[in-house]
Image (cartoon, rainbow, N blue to C red):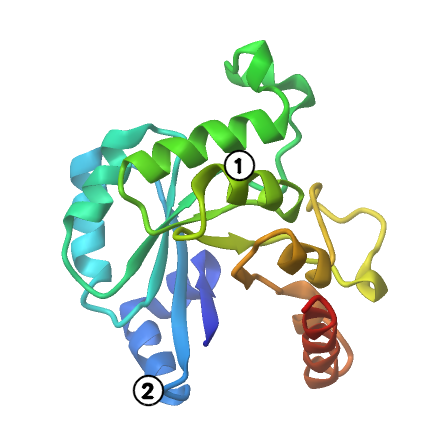
Amino acid sequence: MGFFKIGLELFLKAGPAGVKEVKALISDSTGIFLDLKLHDIPNTVRGAMAAVQTMGADLVTVHAGEGQAMLRAAKEVPGPAKVLAVTVLTSLNLAEGQELGLAPEYTQPQALVLLRARHAQEAGCDGLVCSGQEAAVVREAVGPEMLIVTPGIRPAWSLMEGDDQKRVVTPAQAIRDGADYLVVGRPIREAPDPAQAAARVVEEIESAS
């Protein structure tokens, strides 16, 4: 099963009606990945999830950085959408993480990702979002049941200087390291022929099996 991702930009333009419209246009074998990265006090996240569960989304993201209470609040709301905890954004450079208030031992992405992954699992989340560079250690830590969704996917033919995504991997590497789903945006969206680019990504994924 594949997913059509609706991120913050599209959601702010089209709103809940846009989610339902996309749902009506895609095939039954394609789900909706609502990537809103909810991040607020537990009560507000609980209310937001109640709204999300009426839109037809299959996956929704919640930030993992505010602790387990917020994650549990998201999971308390019944409905079809599974909760994915976003561990550490792939654009974040933790080299000077102490400026963000991080303890020195968590200024390495892998350590912080693993900490938040374990918190998310304990809170009952259905899956995690982490870069492909951490997928293997996260899979080992959380076991086979939790979904791992990997953004920052860059096929070898799409790598470019100045990319704001810092922790990137190829599609094949992410799959080999335990990712269940890959988020592939710009390499397809900004390609001269998006359909051809998507086909090349699929070929790379199949090469990992």
The secondary structure type at the circle numbered 1 is: loop
Which residue is painted at 31% across and 46% down in the image? 125
Residue nearest the observer in this picture, 162 or 81? 81
Query: Label 1 neighbourhood size at 10 Å, few (<14), some (14-19), many (20+)?
Result: many
| Three-letter residue code for mark 2 | Ala
| Three-letter residue code for mark 1 | Val
Mark 2 highlights which residue?
24
Query: Label 2 neighbourhood size at 10 Å, few (<14), some (14-19), many (20+)?
Result: few
Query: Sequence order check: which comes first, mark 2 or mark 1?
Result: 2
Image coords of residue 80 (percent x, y): 23, 66
Which residue is painted at 52% across and 45% down in the image? 139
Q: Quadrant of the N terminus?
A: bottom left
Which residue is painted at 27% across and 37% down in the image? 123
Residue nearest the observer in this picture, 126 or 3? 126
Question: Is 155 situated left or right of 129 in this image?
Answer: right
Any part of residue 41 in sight: no
Q: Quadrant of the C terminus?
A: bottom right
- In space, the residues marked 2 and 1 are separated at their CA atoms by 32 Å
Which residue is painted at 24% across and 69% down in the image? 55
Q: Quadrant of residue 183?
A: bottom right
The answer to whether 17 is drawn above or below residue 119 in the figure is: below
Image coords of residue 87 (percent x, y): 48, 38
The circle drawn on residue 109 is none
Image coords of residue 141 (percent x, y): 49, 37
The secondary structure type at the circle numbered 2 is: helix
Image coords of residue 105 (percent x, y): 58, 13
The answer to whether 181 is drawn above or below residue 143 in the figure is: below
Mark 1 highlights which residue?
88
Of marks 2 and 1, the one in the foreground: 1
Residue nearest the observer in this picture, 109 or 43? 109
